[in-house]
Structures are given as C-alpha cells and as structure tokens.
Image (spheres, grey):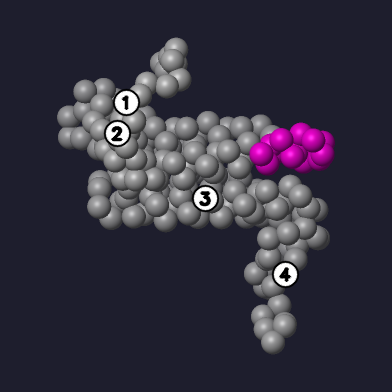
Amino acid sequence: MVKLNKIYTKTGDDGTTGLSDGSRVKKYNLRPSAYGDVDELNSFIGLSINCINKEKKYNFLVEILKKIQNDLFDLGADLSTPIEEKPKFEPLRIKNSQVLNLENMIDKFNNKLEPLNSFVLPGGSEMSCWLHIARTVARRAERSISKLAEKNKINKQSLIYINRLSDFLFVVSRITNDNGKFDILWVPGENQ
C-alpha cells in the first residue's frame, strides 16, 4: 500500500531517484527514463479522457482508458523494480492477461473500421488528435523500454504491453474520427 504524507523528501536533490527495491540511480538512468515516458503517456490519456467527457461522445471509452491508466501505473511499478533471482517481496509485473485484454479490444474496435489503403495523418476530431499524441508518446515509451531491455533484464510482457497499447490507441483514434470517416489519409508526394 502506498502512503504519501510528505510530497518532497529532498532525497533526489543530488540527481538520483529511488527504485522500488530501495536502490538509487541517476534520474537520467534508462529505468527512470522508461517509466517517466510511461508517466507522460498516462497524463495524455488523462487529457484524452477529459476531452471525451467534455464532448460527451464516445463515453464507452472512458472506463477502458481509466483501466489502461491503472495498467500504466502497474507498468511503471514493473519498470521501477529490477528483476532479482530472490526478491524480498513479490514485485508487481505486467501479466499476459493485460496484453490479451488489449488485443481483444483492438480486434473488437478494428472490426468496426474499413481497412486502410494509406497511412493516417494525425488529425480529424480533437479526441482523435489527443489519442494520436498519446500513441506517439507510447511509441517513445516503447523505445525507452526497448533500450532498457538491451542493457537490463526486464519483464518481457512490459515491452509487449506498451507495443499493443500504441496499436490500441491508433485504432481508438480512428474510432473517435467517426469510425474512420474523418481520418486524414497520407498522399505520398502530394506536394512535390
């Protein structure tokens, strides 16, 4: 259980941050960089929820996105906990069931869309734009997690989860463009 009585601790004043196992690393270390990108993604999903609530359209996405926000805190906890052979406590890790949940939603929503014959440019509705921003931040988080995995042992489900999440956000950005009707398609070389 997390309990936050005091917001500032001054322990990071030397440019380090604490990991879940109690160790300290530089704030620019691959691990806090990865979960920092996940935190930024979570903020953009919160902004997307706010936009949906404001426009009162696509309300069915609100609960889904809130569950994803919770999963992103799980992902942050996973990434902030180095893998140990004999951990002192059972760490919170992203599970395959969370990945499968995203895959099921991708399939469900993608079935409502016409197949694409071109790449989609970010745009259309305001909701779609915010979801595209979240998607690109998810891709950055994926790059950060991939870089972390190159140097450190990580839970492979965390990398798979963030990959599926960016796909989910792409599909949902099309859903919020009236099921793709307002998608703006890329025309290669149009302005040459």
Mark 1 and mark 2 in contact? Answer it, CB < 8 Å. yes
Coordinates of residue 157 in the picture (x, y in percent): 38, 44
The tag on residue 14 is 2
Type of amino acid under label 1: Thr
Mark 3 and mark 4 in contact? Answer it, CB < 8 Å. no
Coordinates of residue 37 in the picture (x, y in percent): 46, 45
Give the extent of the magenta segment: 47-61
Q: In the image, is residue 50 above or below residue 170?
A: above
Q: Earlier in the sequence, mark 2 or mark 4?
A: 2
**Which residue, given by chain and number where applicable, does mark 3 sit on?**
138
Q: Residue at horizontal 25%, vertical 48%?
A: 152
Query: Which residue appears farthest toward the left when viewing the image?
Result: 86
Cα gap from disc 3 to disc 4, whole angstroms: 21 Å
Cα gap from disc 1 to disc 2, whole angstroms: 7 Å
Coordinates of residue 47 in the picture (x, y in percent): 66, 39
Cα gap from disc 3 to disc 1, whole angstroms: 29 Å
In the rendered structure, the answer to whether residue 161 lies left or right of residue 119 reads: left
**Which residue, given by chain and number where applicable, does mark 4 sit on?**
185
Q: Earlier in the sequence, mark 4 or mark 1?
A: 1
* Secondary structure state at the residue bearing disc 3: helix
